[in-house]
């Protein structure tokens, strides 16, 4: 039988899903985007309320601010771009390591050609 995790220990329970569909733990950049969106919502709604004193319109502006900031952070700004750039760098490094292992100590090894570039005289 599996023991229940202690109160202070992180356990492998159900993943946290936002609105039942967005798995915040496994989707890259989702957590940061949601946090930035909620902050943008508060700033936009509160700022609009302080300027106009219209409650309903301020709530609408807050929801719009949440959507714009969340999608902007996720798609347009650094989060998804940096994630894609990191994936490309990892793929290039993996290919380089694979080629190094594959061609090491063969006549196709580029490092071997550089050291024996002077030619040998017999």
Image: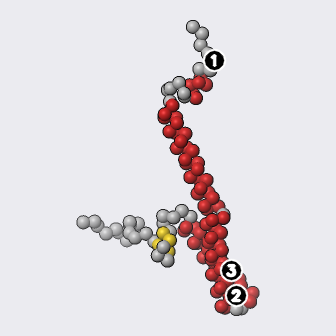
Residue shown at 58% from the left, 72% from the top: 35
Q: Is residue 89 visible?
A: yes
Q: Residues within 10 Å of mark 2 (few under 14, many from 20)?
A: some
Q: Position of residue 83 (x, y in %)?
A: 58, 57
Near mark 1 (Cα within 10 A), the count class, few <14, some 14-19 or many ≥20, is: few
Q: Which residue is mark 2?
A: 49
Mark before the other along the chain sequence, 2 or 3? 3
Which residue occupies the foreground of this view, 109 or 37?
Answer: 109
Viewed as shown, does residue 2 lie left or right of 115? Answer: left
Name the side, left or right, on which 102 lies relative to 64.
left
Residue to which mark 1 is pinned: 118
> Which element type, helix, strand or loop, lies under badge 1?
loop
Indicate the colouring scheme.
Answer: secondary structure
SS class, disc 2? helix
Label annotation for residue 82 = none
Q: Is residue 66 above or below residue 53?
A: above
Q: CA distance from mark 3 to mark 1?
A: 69 Å
Q: Which residue is mark 3?
A: 44
Residue sitting at the far right: 51
Q: Position of residue 9 (x, y in %)?
A: 39, 66
């Amino acid at each position: 039988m599996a023991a229940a995790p202690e109160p202070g220990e992180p356990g492998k329970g159900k993943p946290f899903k936002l609105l039942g569909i967005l798995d915040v733990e496994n989707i890259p950049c989702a957590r940061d985007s949601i946090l930035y969106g909620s902050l943008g919502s508060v700033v936009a709604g509160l700022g609009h309320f302080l300027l106009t004193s219209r409650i309903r319109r301020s709530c609408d502006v807050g929801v719009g601010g949440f959507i714009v900031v969340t999608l902007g952070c996720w798609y347009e700004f650094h989060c998804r771009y940096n994630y894609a750039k990191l994936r490309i760098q990892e793929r290039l490094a993996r290919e380089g390591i694979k080629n190094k292992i594959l061609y090491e100590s063969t006549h196709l090894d580029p490092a071997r050609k550089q050291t024996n570039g002077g030619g040998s005289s017999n």
